[in-house]
Amino acid sequence: MLMKMSMILLLFLSMLSLLSLITSNETSEFIAIFCPNTTTFTPDAGGFEFNFPDSFQTNRNEVLNNLTSPAAPDTGFYNTTAGLNSREKAYGLFLCQGYVSTKVCKHCVTAASTMATQRCPNGINAIVWYDHCMLRYSNESLSTLSEWPVFYMCNVRNATEWNRFNQVLAESMYEVATEATNTANKFATKQANISRFLTLYSLAQCTWDLSAVYCNRCLTLAVTELPNSCEGKEGGRVLMPGCNVRFEIYPFYLQNATSAPAPAPKALPPPALKGRRKHFPTITIVVGCVGIALIVVSLVVALGYCLPGRRERKKNEEALQQENGKQQDMRTAESLQFELGTLETATNKFCEDNKLGEGGFGAVFKGILTNGQEIAVKRLSKSSGQGVQEFKNEVVLVAKLQHRNLVRLLGFCLEGEETILVYEYVPNKSLDYFLFEHRKREQLDWLSRTMIIGGIARGILYLHEDSRLRVIHRDLKASNILLDSNMNPKISDFGMARMFGVDDQTEGNTKRIVGTYGYMAPEYAMEGLYSVKSDVFSFGVLLLEIITGRRNFLGFHRTNCGPTLIGYAWQLWNEKKGLELMDPLLKDSCSPNEFLRYIHIGLLCVQEDANNRPTMSSVVHMLKTETISLSRPEKPAFFTGRYVDHHDQIRSQDCSANGLTISIDVPR
């Protein structure tokens, strides 16, 4: 049997050796080209509404010549302009992958320039992507962030050890994107072990002319596209005008590469590229056919050994997989457990000077581990009714929630009377710290606020649809949104969250109302009904607070019976006076039309009927795509201030206090 398996392995290795011959060259593979036909220049410069003068073509050609010139810098990035008049000026740049040699870079840029000239002879803007470089030209400055178009490619093979793979992937992409944002050449790579025999390789890169803020936003959007397009795959990449990200289970990048690395296994092309034919030399076809034949032989031989007793083996494999899953969860719980002494040392025995704040569940302290890692330690005030094993199981579930816009749970401690949760440390405090204080709010321009709104939306979408568990947060509010060093939002405090393992379960009910009035949906505050649409309502309130700089209830009106923020927004929007809601600090950085669109989206989220509210996937799409038409919102819930007391009695004569939190004692 061992000899037979060795023969199969030998055939497989032979196949890989032959296939490697196909890719052992320095030619960079063409991926995609974007050349919109909405605006063109023509020789006669007449007859079209958006025509550009002949001089633009001259300037564009000069830009392309500069980019491909031997005198162009060999740093892997170069941008240039030609022309003086704003109407005829041309801008251009190229960006090479940080791992390729100067020779490969220049060869790739030359090929991209030729492709742009051939495919877009009259276009005033174009983007060409090759495996090792990107070239772009336009009639507008390229140093600002462009969020469109987006191309993606995915490896056809499905990932194994799915849970662990996704966890490592989320962590790796977050870390490599953060590193790329903060480096001079806007490029970073990372490798992380998924298992003893499987390693994940990841890459993130921005064009050098983007600011750290723009680079961060671009990479955030690119990383967010990965689970939408390449979920469960062994590899994938997302390409945008200003940045790109990629992951694989083989080392696709080479440090100080002198020749182009082997391309990825056959990847699925983006939708826009389907149907494109590629031509290969005859020798390539022959070698490819031999390789395919070997694959078929290997599969047939392997299948012969697998057929006897297949059903019985399948049952045994399923039972073994379940047992392995349980053992893996036990190992995960053990790896997440901190010793009390370690946390006492990290926080200087929970010293008051290290106290970051105190919530309904207990105090939070800053700590520094012996390896220098900063952590946030939440010391729960009371022990729950859960058993030790149940608590560990729940911690393992929360720890599996890995997303750029969620605060990561690093572990826990259960010793004696102590019940402690350990989170990643987020340095910039919470959103309310910036949003509701005038001097701090000056740091939040329109771009920062839209980045925060988009990040929160993507985090909620992950909880609702993209994680292995369906999670309803139930306490989304400004104080539960933390901001990292780059002002990326991170949803925190899952103490009131509800998790569903069943895919089609999206709602529940309870007699114990927990959450913060002012952010709670009406069906939850009054009837105890919660669903994904409850979180959508809370997000709508948050959106309106972020763009207006005003709280929903507390301090919004001096009178007891004035409308709430969402009621006031509804009123002004109907009177076509929505711009009166704009935070005066945004006047120099915000487009009026974009502001009104955000008001519109917020009002759709806070409609009284939960069925009328959009899903978070729809909200994310609305925020990303300005061309989507929005439906007319119905009247929002809680139009006027109302206070819900501990006995669920609603008194419309009083305004609700936004800061009132009703909650259970410990996380569930």
Image (cartoon, grey):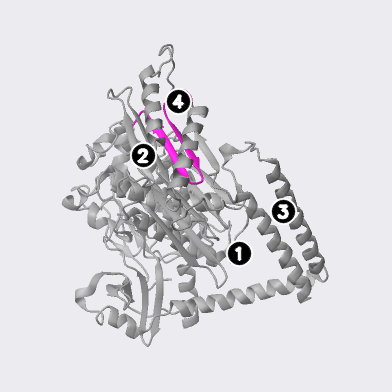
Which one is in front, 132 or 434?
132
Q: In this view, does 403 lie to the left or right of 268?
A: left
Residue 106: x and y, percent? Answer: 44, 42
**Label 4 residue SS:** loop
Q: What element carries label 3?
A: helix
Give the residue pinned by disc 4: 123
User: Can residue 324 be found in the magenta stretch?
Assistant: no
Task: Give the percent coordinates (x, y) of residue 440.
Answer: 19, 53
**Residue farthest left in this picture:** 439
Residue at disc 2, secondary structure: loop
Badge 4 amino acid: Gly
Residue positioned most to the front: 70
**Nearest-to-viewer mark from 3 and 1:** 3
| Any part of residue 307 in sight | yes
User: Which badge, 2 or 1, is on the more N-terminal residue?
Assistant: 2
Give residue 72's mark.
Answer: 2
Q: How crowded is mark 2: few (under 14 residues within 10 Å), some or many (20 or more)?
A: some
* Mark toward the start of the polypeptide (4 vs 2): 2
N-term-proximal mark, 4 vs 1: 4
The secondary element bearing badge 1 is classed as: loop
- What stretch of residues is rendered in magenta? 121-141
**Residue position marked by numbered label 3 in the rendering:** 291
Label 2 – label 3 distance at C-alpha: 41 Å
Frontmost residue, 48 versus 318: 48
Give the residue type that dot 1 points to.
Answer: Thr
